[in-house]
Image (tube, rainbow, N blue to C red):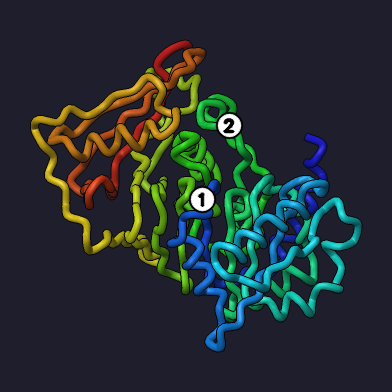
Amino acid sequence: MSQKPLLIFCITLLLSIPLASCGNAVLAGGAVSWKNQEIYDEFINQATLEDGTIYIGIITAGISLSIAKSTATDIANQLRLKYGVQNAEWLPFHPDSGTTCKSDQWNDKLNQMTGLYFNGGDVFPIVSCFLNSPALSIIQSRYASGDLAIFGSSAGSMAMQSTPVRSMRESWSALVYGSTYAARAGLGLFNAGIMDVHFSTRGRLGALARFVYDYQSSSTIGFGVDQDTAFVTTDDDLFEVVGTSGVSIIDVSEASKYSPDGNGKRWAIRNVKVSYLTDGDSYYASSGEIVFADDKSELEGSDSVTPRTTSNVFGDGAFISVARSLFSSSETETSGTTMESKPRYEIDFRKEDDSVGYSSGSLISFRNLYVDIYCVLNC
């Protein structure tokens, strides 16, 4: 890749930057509807001072400069018209805008702002823009002290992590060709694990499981945030899910590579633990504890429910649909395969003694679903 020398440069700089503790943040999985008041209210409340002051900076470094300003204008208009935020403006930090990213001319404004809205696009331009910059030092310091709220959407969320940032290679390709990163580390604001976005819609279970396993020296935990959903935190430990879908937690601490057919020609893994949290559920980063919302009840699987299978396990919402059906059933195992056949992968899902599901209405959350991923055809 032509970016490789710059990535090596990025590694050196990022690893020399002190990491901020988690403060006030709303990290969304992308495609957040402007009608999703619950998510935007969380950010606006975090960014509003006791005297009512709110001043939002909008950063669109992850998209082309030609549309960055117009996108920021749209965001500012939506914040004003739908949520009454009168003071929101574009900060022209962008890798294609000359020296703006490294300039200190915006320091005064950054020190006045109460919140920053990081739009999506591409992770690499966001990270490279802020490397070794006065702006990043201010953002990290004010975030760590609780004086600055952060909103991230899609790539804007992924850029917040302190771990390696996954490239957008999708699940089947990642299983077949391996893990790649867009940046060796992010901006150092999210320290709980490895972040991914658009998770269920784009079927990224395989991609994130492999990436976290390959980079487990950084973290054994991955977080896959769905669209129109956010991970919300107000301290350095407690995260709550808000929104219409959920957050998958991928734990490879007990996982291992293996060779089901004995030849080891294709990458395979077993005992990946997957949990899925929906609106109102919480996660404690220090202990890994999951607390389901008070309005959810423990699921007792029914003998009359047959768990789903699928021939497109990385299709839109497929693996979550299969997993939910397993927790609705008294059966303990099911599986799915990839649509691709050269090679074809199978994903086995199973419940163990520590597996549990919770539900409220149509929402189903679960903890500790065990997953094996391996090749079954044209291996």
Q: Residue at x 59, y 63 (%)?
A: 81
- Label 2, on which residue? 178
Q: Quadrant of residue 269?
A: top left
**Tag of residue 321:** none
Q: Residue at x 37, y 41 (%)?
A: 272
Q: Residue at x 75, y 52 (%)?
A: 70
Please name whichever residue, 245 or 208, is drawn nearer the observer in this view of the structure: 245
Hey, which residue is sitting farthest bottom in the picture?
51
- Label 1, on which residue? 33
Horizontal and vertical percent for residue 306? 17, 27
Q: Callout 1: few (<14), some (14-19), or many (20+) C-alpha neighbours within 10 Å?
A: some
Horizontal and vertical percent for residue 158? 59, 52
Q: Callout 2: few (<14), some (14-19), or many (20+) C-alpha neighbours within 10 Å?
A: some
What's the residue type where badge 2 is placed?
A: Gly
Residue 357 is left or right of residue 49, and the answer is left
Secondary element at image label 2: loop
Q: Residue at x 55, y 54 (%)?
A: 218
Screen quadrant of the N terminus:
top right
What's the residue type where badge 1 is placed?
A: Ser
Secondary element at image label 1: loop
Residue 200 is left or right of residue 110, and the answer is left
The earlier-in-sequence mark between 2 and 1 is 1
On screen, residue 312 above or below 20: above
Horizontal and vertical percent for residue 62? 72, 49
Hey, which residue is sitting farthest left in the picture?
303
